[in-house]
Amino acid sequence: MIQGFYRVHYHLPKRQGFCICVLKAGQIAGGGGLMHYTGSYKQIGRQFVGEMHAKMHAGVSETVFHGLKDFYLQLSGMVCGGYGQIAGEIVEVPDAVVRATISRLSMI
C-alpha cells in the first residue's frame, strides 16, 4: 500500500526542487513554501495514476513550473514499497513534463 507522508524531489529540464505530500485513501494533499496541491490517485499493483491541481499561495512573481501559478497535472508512474518514480504532464503546457521521485517518510 502506498499510503503515507512523502518527500517529493521533482525535476524539470533546467530546475529541481522539493516538497511534501500525503497519499491516503486515494487522495493527494501537499505543498511547499510557494505552492500547495490537491488531487486523487489510484494504485493498481505497482502502477500509479492520478491527477493533481497545483496553486500558488505565496506572492512570488514566477514559479519553476513554466511560470504557471495555477495548473493541473496528469500523473503516471511506478511505485514499490515506500518509493516511486512519477511523471506529471502539465495540462496547460503541451509536452511539459515534471518528473518526481517520491520517498516515504512515515506511515499514516
Image (spheres, grey):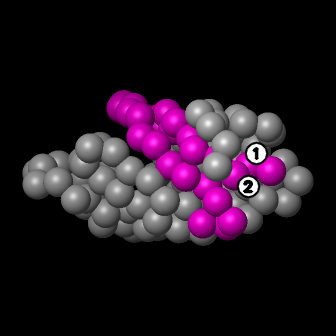
Determine the image quadrant of residue 50: bottom right
Q: CA distance from mark 1 to mark 2?
A: 6 Å
| Residue 9 located within the stretch drawn in magenta | yes
In this rendering, position of residue 34 left or right of residue 103: left
Q: Main secondary structure of the magenta part?
A: strand
Point out which mark residue 48 bears: 2
- Residue range highlighted in magenta: 1-27
The disc labelled 1 sits on which kind of residue? Met
- Of residue 73 and residue 37, the one placed in the foreground of this image is 37
| Secondary structure state at the residue bearing disc 1 | strand
Residue at position x 35%, y 57% from top? 36
Q: Identify the image quadrant of residue 16.
A: top left
Which residue reaches farthest right? 45
Query: Disc 2 on helix, strand or loop?
Result: strand
Amino acid identity at mark 2: Phe
Residue 73 visible here: no
When the figure is inspected, residue 21 is found, relative to residue 42, above or below; the finding is above
Q: Is residue 56 visible?
A: yes
Q: In the rendering, which numbered label is found on residue 62?
A: none
63 displayed left or right of 108: left
Please, is residue 101 above or below residue 61 in the view?
above
Judging depth in this view, the residue of 68 and 51 nearest the camera is 51
Tag 2: Cα neighbours inside 10 Å, few (<14), some, or many (≥20)?
many
Q: Name the residue furthest front.
A: 108
**Label for residue 78?**
1
